[in-house]
Image (tube, helix red, strand yellow):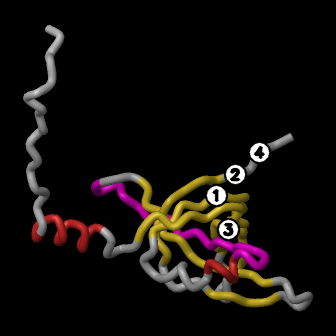
Amino acid sequence: MSLNVWCFTGRLGRDAETRYLPAGTQVLEFSVAVDVGYGDKKNTIWTKCTLFGERGGRLAQYLTKGTQVAVSGEVNLREWQDRDGGKRSTLEVRVDKVDMIGKRDDAGPRQEQQKRDPPKPTAPSFDDDDDIPF
């Protein structure tokens, strides 16, 4: 028995696209940029994601370029030869679960709102009529 599940987060590189197989099955495809490492060692892995069935059709409108997502599914490394005879490969994930965790501009408006409307301090309320048992 083997287990093949990859869980990752990243940003969509472009809007998700819907297509249909000859049998009529709906397929949603999107690419996710996954950053690995940090500093001068930072690298981006592009991952092709495929979600089969009606669920993908319902999500398509929300999966737009720049959206942050958390994805889990079965991973596969597909290899092929390009037109020039060079060996190429890509990571592909057959998506089991996808969660939207934000948009590129989510941090900006929240921070701006906080700058305009700072929280108002509230003083604790004390009831002087209470008997304090100590």
Give percent across and percent down for residue 108: 24, 72
Residue 82: mark: none
Q: Residues within 10 Å of mark 2 (few under 14, many from 20)?
A: some
Q: Earlier in the sequence, mark 1 or mark 2?
A: 2
In this picture, is 84 found above or below 38?
Answer: below
Residue 108 is one of the magenta-drawn residues: no
Query: Which residue is rendered at x = 33% and y = 71% of the image?
Result: 106
What's the magenta region? 39-55
Tag 3: amino acid: Glu
Which label sits on residue 5? 2
Can you identify the residue that label 4 sits on? Answer: 3
Report if the CB atoms under discs 4 and 2 are less than 8 Å apart. yes
Q: Which of marks 4 and 1 is nearer the N terminus?
A: 4
* Chain-order first, disc 3 or disc 2: 2
Q: Reading the chain from its start, which is encountered first: label 4 or label 3?
A: 4
Q: In this view, does 131 lie to the left or right of 46?
A: left
Residue 47 point in image, percent of width and height: 58, 69
- Specify the quadrant that holds the N terminus: top right
Cα–Cα gap, marks 3 and 2: 12 Å
Earlier in the chain: of badge 1 and badge 3, it is 1
Q: Looking at numbered disc 2 in the image, what kind of residue is underneath it?
A: Val
In the picture of the structure, the residue carrying the numbered disc 1 is 72
Q: Nearer the viewer, mark 3 or mark 2?
A: 2
| Residue 116 in the figure: left or right of residue 36 | left
- Residue 16 percent location from the top left of the image: 58, 83
Separation of disc 4 and disc 1 at Cα? Answer: 13 Å
Q: How far apart are marks 1 and 3 (CA)?
A: 11 Å
Picture quadrant where residue 86 is located: bottom right
Cα distance, mark 4 to mark 2? Answer: 6 Å
